[in-house]
Amino acid sequence: MKFAATIIAMTIALSNVEANTPTHLRVLTDEAAMDYSSAPVAEWGQCKWVDRSATCADGLQCVVYSDWYGQCVKKVASTWGQCGGKGWTGSCTSGNICQKMNDYYSQCVPC
């Protein structure tokens, strides 16, 4: 309900602004007003934000790329998949080894 009232107030305020006028809008809310899901995050989903993190689904790990972003990826990589690098830990499927390419990227290659 608070969200709907905020949208209505914003719409009224913005309708009184000329089209060529720069407008800045900042909405402050408390954590309780946000609807964060507690369900595990699926593959390729975001699991890290600046102010919180979420759990990845089974078989996945959260690879954190920065203070603001992390992504759920498979713990075990198949052939040619990423298995290591800065901020990344993982392993390869059977028949592959994790070969370091540089400090930021390691790849599963056939044995």
Image (cartoon, rainbow, N blue to C red):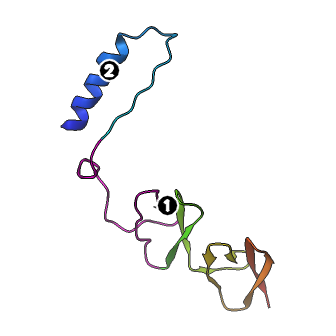
Q: Is residue 56 left or right of residue 16?
A: right
Name the amino acid type tagged 1: Gly
Most extreme residue toward the left is: 1
On whether residue 3 falls in the magenta region, the answer is no
Query: Is residue 51 within the magenta segment?
Result: yes
Disc 1 element: loop
- Point out the stretch of residues depicted in magenta: 29-58
Mark 2 is on which residue type?
Thr
Q: Residues within 10 Å of mark 1 (few under 14, many from 20)?
A: some
When the figure is inspected, residue 28 is found, relative to residue 54, above or below; the finding is above
> Left or right: 37 with respect to 83?
left
User: Where does label 1 land, which residue?
Assistant: 45
First of labels 2, 1 by sequence position: 2
25 and 61: which is toward the camera:
25
Residue 104 lies in what quarter of the image? bottom right
Where is residue 48 shown, x and y percent of the image? 47, 62
Name the residue beneath numbered marker 2: 11
